[in-house]
Image: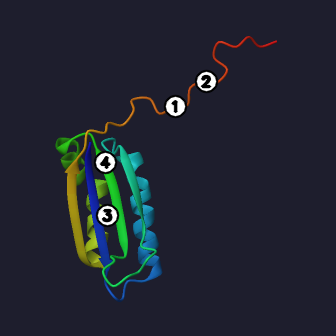
Amino acid sequence: MLHHIVLFKFKPDTDEAQIAALEKMLDALPEQIIEIQLYEFGRDVVRSERSHDFALVSGFANLAAMQRYQVHPAHKKVIAHVQAICEDVRAVDFETAYSAPENLEEPDPFRGCKMP
């Protein structure tokens, strides 16, 4: 799996509505972009001097899948919003041996049981 980690530092004048809009846009991406296998994001809770304000952790099958995600029109809309509200964006991408399971459904706990 290719992990894509992004750290965001908001501009000083970025307001709550703009951050909420970013969250809403990011939340919609996994339903729009099939290449996304892992997608989590959130606001920093520690708020130390070295902290960024927001982070995104995403996972893709491989580099080609991430590149398709990066040029998807829905992702490009997010990028435009990020450019408007962030003063700094940092990213790192790395590979691991982890692969997402093919079937995410819970197995039927009653399979094989005789029901009265």
Seen from the viewer's position, the closer of residues 15 and 116 is: 116
* Residue at x 21%, y 51% (from the top left corner): 94
* Residue at x 33%, y 77% (from the top left corner): 51
Mark 1 vs 3: CB contact within 8 A: no
The amino acid type found where label 3 is placed reads Val
Q: Earlier in the sequence, mark 1 or mark 4?
A: 4
Q: Earlier in the sequence, mark 2 or mark 4?
A: 4
Residue of label 1: 105
Mark 1 vs 4: CB contact within 8 A: no
In the rendered view, would you say 75 is above or below 109?
Answer: below
Residue of label 3: 78
The amino acid type found where label 4 is placed reads Gly
The Cα atoms of the two marked residues, 2 and 4, are separated by 28 Å
Residue of label 4: 59
The quarter of the picture where the C terminus appears is top right
The Cα atoms of the two marked residues, 1 and 2, are separated by 9 Å
- x, y (%) of residue 79? 26, 65
Q: Nearer the viewer, mark 3 or mark 4?
A: 4
Q: Residues within 10 Å of mark 4 (few under 14, many from 20)?
A: many
- x, y (%) of residue 57? 34, 57
* Residue at x 28%, y 64% (from the top left corner): 6
